[in-house]
Amino acid sequence: MLSQVESRLAPKYEELLGCLDDGELIGTARLVELIDCLIAFIASLVVRHPKWLGPERKKASTLIPFLFEKETLTVSDLETLEVMGLKDDLPAIVEMAIMDAALFSTDERAPLMQIVDILKPMNVTYFAAPDNCEFIATSFPLHAEWMSTSDADPVAVYFPLSSQFAVAFRSCEPTGGKLVWPLVAEQVDSLNRCLVGGSDLNDLVFGTNGSYLASIISATAQHGNQ
């Protein structure tokens, strides 16, 4: 289902990249709609982050007694599960239901929509890489930052849109009149290292220059060991 959601958003994503490439973003009413679609896409990634999914998954063990108490799960339901050979898998079934709600529900109380609500008020900045550099991608192509480990809501989210463009959502004052900020190679390197080293979910790294990818991976590892 995640792939279906992302495939529906893909045309909007491509349109946004086209606008960035043509420099036709500022002052267009279409920009608002495109940013909303981008937010929905990024929220679908943030909600998969262990920092968000972990607490949701833990709810399964505490929710089962609640289901019995409120008679949401009846004896008849248990008998049906037993016939289907699933009675012993009840915690896993409840966890799957929780994950489904977390990842796909558009209810305003669902984690996915909570992330959308967090991102919408943030300031959006697009970055452009210089000709001699590129934004790389990873298997979890998103870097989120929290003010402290105890905070639930991220204060910044970075996402590489393509090898040429990236976007950042930040809880800070606007940086000025520019919507697209050209970066120098060192700044792109720094963002790439943050992305590679920012999540244990990253087991693959993607880019067009193999030696550059190797240098970023090596630099990220060295920084992590310091």
Image (spheres, rainbow, N blue to C red):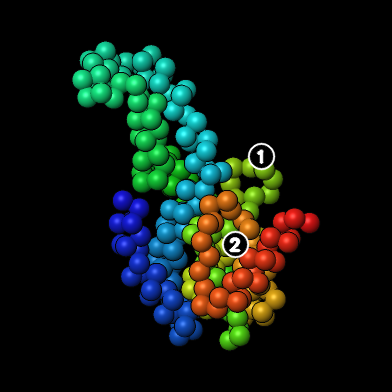
Residue in the foreground of this view, choosing between 81 and 142: 81
Q: Which residue is drawn at the image coordinates 61% and 70% (left, top)? A: 214
Of pointers 1 and 2, the one earlier in the residue sequence: 1
Residue in the foreground of this view, choosing between 40 and 78: 78
Between tags 1 and 2, which lies in front? 2
Res. 167 mark: none
Instruction: Determine if residue 171 is in view.
Output: no
The x and y percentages for residue 59 are 47, 29
Q: Callout 2: helix, strand or loop?
A: helix
Q: Residues within 10 Å of mark 2 (few under 14, many from 20)?
A: many
Q: Is residue 184 above or below residue 55?
A: below
Q: Which residue is drawn at the image coordinates 43% and 53% (left, top)? A: 44
Q: Callout 1: helix, strand or loop?
A: loop
Q: Amino acid at mark 2?
A: Leu
Q: Which residue is drawn at the image coordinates 51% and 61% (left, top)? A: 204
Q: Which residue is mark 1?
A: 150
Dividing the picture into quadrants, the one containing residue 91 is top left
Residue 168 horizontal side relative to residue 47, left or right: right
Q: Which residue is mark 2?
A: 195
Q: Which residue is drawn at the image coordinates 78% and 56% (left, top)? A: 226
Residue in the foreground of this view, choosing between 108 and 62: 62
